[in-house]
Image (cartoon, helix red, strand yellow):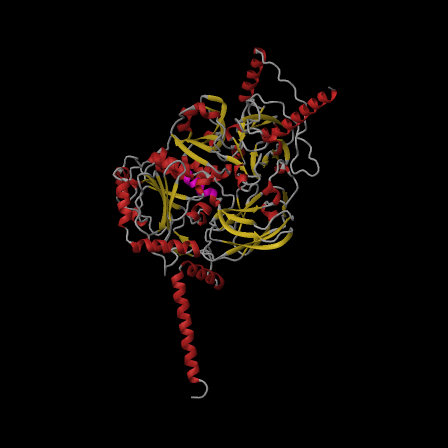
Amino acid sequence: MKIFIAAILSLLSVAATAQAQSVPFDMSPERGPSAILPPPVSTPPAQPTQNQGLPRPPQHPVTPTPARSPASDALQAKAAASLASQPRRYLIPTDILKLSGEIDERSWSVYLTPEQASSPARFNLGYQNSVVIAPELSRLAIHINNISIVDEEIRSSDMPLEQSFDIPAGVLRPGANLLSFQTKQRHRTDCTLESTYELWTDIDPTKTFISFSDAGATRPSRLDDIRAIGVDGAGKTKFKLVVPALEQLGTSGLLMRLAQGLGLLSNMPNQTFSFSTAVKDAADASEPGQLTIFVGTVAELQPLLGQLPAGVSGGSIAGFVPYPGAPQETALVLSGPTWQSIDSLVNSLATSPDGSASATRNTLSTQAWRPLDTVFLSSDSTFNFSQLGVKTQEFSGRLFRTNFAVGIPADFYAKAYGQMQILLDAAYTNEVLPGSHIDIYVNGNIASTMPINTGGGAVLRKLPINVTLRHFRPGVNTVVIEAALRTQADIECVPGSTASDTPRFALFDTSQFHIPDFARIAQTPNLAAVSGTAFPYGRSDEAVPLFLDRIDENTLSAAATFLGKLSEAAHRVIPVDVRASAAAIIDQNAIFIGSISQIPPTVLAQFEIADSSRAGWTSSPMGLNGAQNTALTVDNWGESFNSEGRISRRITAFKNWLKRSFDLSTSSLRFAPSSDDTFTPSNASTFMVAQEGGPNGKGTWTLVTAPSSDRLREGVDALSTGTNWALLDGRIVTYQGEDRYSTVAVNAFRFVPTQPLTLVNVRLIVANWLSDNIMSYSVLLAGVAVFLGFITVTLLSRLGRS
């Protein structure tokens, strides 16, 4: 009997142990409903132990959840309301922040005022993660100025989690504060490389912010506080300018300079500007990430504000006053007795950080969305990874990933032949099997692959990996290094193998990035140069003609937002001369902004845009294109396909074979660039940006247009986000809504010299042109061979015995 009872107890013990071990692989929700504000008491981060990459939380005894009562619910609601009423500073400069893969890190700087840095503050975090993430093996860490604020399990797969943490005194400081999000994520059951793409944690920008106990912490009181305006819950920064004399032509140039100066001062990546003649809604005065600016003379602003800064009647002045209808908030006022006095005030405010247009740039300002300013490459350069922000790190997973950024000048001309090198310092253990590989991506495109063909482990010292320059573009370029690691343990994938913290790969910050001298000559048209460095407008100290079809709220708002993006790319204020007529704009760089019906036909002809677009482009889903498509059927599509001859299908197959086998296209098999066709925007498009050379081969013209002024404003606002702005390329870009863009590539272009044409630079330019026009290169090579043969025959006939 005793033996029977002992056996029963033993079986129960084994069953309980098995149940406990199966919990990490349970695919059911990991937790109950998340507790939204008020914030829970934050748990101190666990201390790291040896042989661990990220620290694990200390184990606490499980305590029963106390029963809820009406009194506790009332206290909870009161605390939530108190915290919700506190001023907040949103932190994420984009509308989406997804940390993906087994390891990921995002860092950028957040500017704070002295009042914000000294105020007691809490860090609010909202996120949700993939259901396949194993919470006991995955961690989320957040640091401010390299001090840990959050370090916990990733445990929110069933519904969004929102919680709050105290920020210790002294962590925040006036000026730039480095904010860093880091994740280590492991799959519950899968060990394949493909499974790493299922690992993600979405940080919610609307629920991730710093709240301040000081009620006036986010209320600007000095001009320097504009740097701390920050972003809203969608990652945008909004400037609202109230100008009673908005429709006066003489004020437009001043307002364009002011918008650029404000944008440079805030230095945020997603800025928009809007204009109005009066206060429309005082309720949004306290919204984070926006600033209202009143501009006008004393007589014009007195009826709107009532109270103006002291001393304004004696001269121009810039200061903050209570917002009309919301006295607890403030607004910036730029005023004076006359517009001439306001003009001098704006000139003092709209200063260029980089000085004149001829000043040499060593970096691109990217600290608002990257950990460092981006190094700017102008010639043969070599940088250690440590200089590019890449740290030495060990890795125990399957797909290692890290990245850095480099800046390319607007006159970059080396896509067809150039290569850069990564000199890799890395190591992998004997667990890594042949068939693993290291990949290099440039701006999301695969640029190079280095296979690992030998097992047994290795230490790589300055291993050269050649990377083509075809995917580089003017401005900021992101280079991603990935190591796909295969091991026998991952193939077998026994339970618990995803929890291993034994390093199998290491990357060292002594690795180097090297780019040789490349051809330096600009090309027109090239919208990538506009978005990257604002070329050619950022290189001019003379005022750039700016044609505006109308001086209304929508057109001025679109123009200010577009110029704000240009000044951000150039890192300087671009002087403009606002004009209502395009007749005198001939041999100059110029910008045209307005609805397409108001753009002169001669200007549209210069851009190779059909004149019928002035009346036919309606941006309506019920337009002619939609009517024509209704007649499309399966039968007539099949008839159209069958009508193609056998020869044309063979030609198409041959083209595909060339592209697949030799990466050659029909556009590259040419003697010289062909001319561009006339372009007609479809009615599915709502916005367009185009570029062409000016008449007589002088100057560069850029057109920003849409079917109507409201569409124009919507299109520029959508384009102003950092991710969309980087899509500008080719000679024409159209916008179809919902962040969908189409690009028309450049065929014919002209060169724009930007520096003395030395022998070395001319050789590099010719090399790229011939590489881009293969048939000309082939004919030239054949001609040289024939010439050498002729010279040889001639010499041999004259030398030696007859």
The quadrant in which residue 666 appears is bottom left
The answer to whether residue 666 is seen in the rendering is no
Judge whether 598 appears above or below 796 on screen. above
Q: Quadrant of the C terminus?
A: bottom left
Q: Main secondary structure of the magenta part?
A: helix
| Relative depth, front residue between 604 and 404 | 404
Query: In the image, which residues are magenta?
Result: 561-568
Judge whether 746 appears above or below 141 on screen. below
Q: Residue at x 49, y 26 (%)?
A: 330
Indicate yes or no whether the magenta region holds residue 566. yes
The answer to whether residue 303 is seen in the rendering is yes
Indicate yes or no whether the magenta region holds residue 751. no
| Relative depth, front residue between 62 and 526 | 62
Residue 570 at x, y = what percent? 47, 45
Residue 17 at x, y = what percent? 66, 27
The quadrant in which residue 167 appears is top right
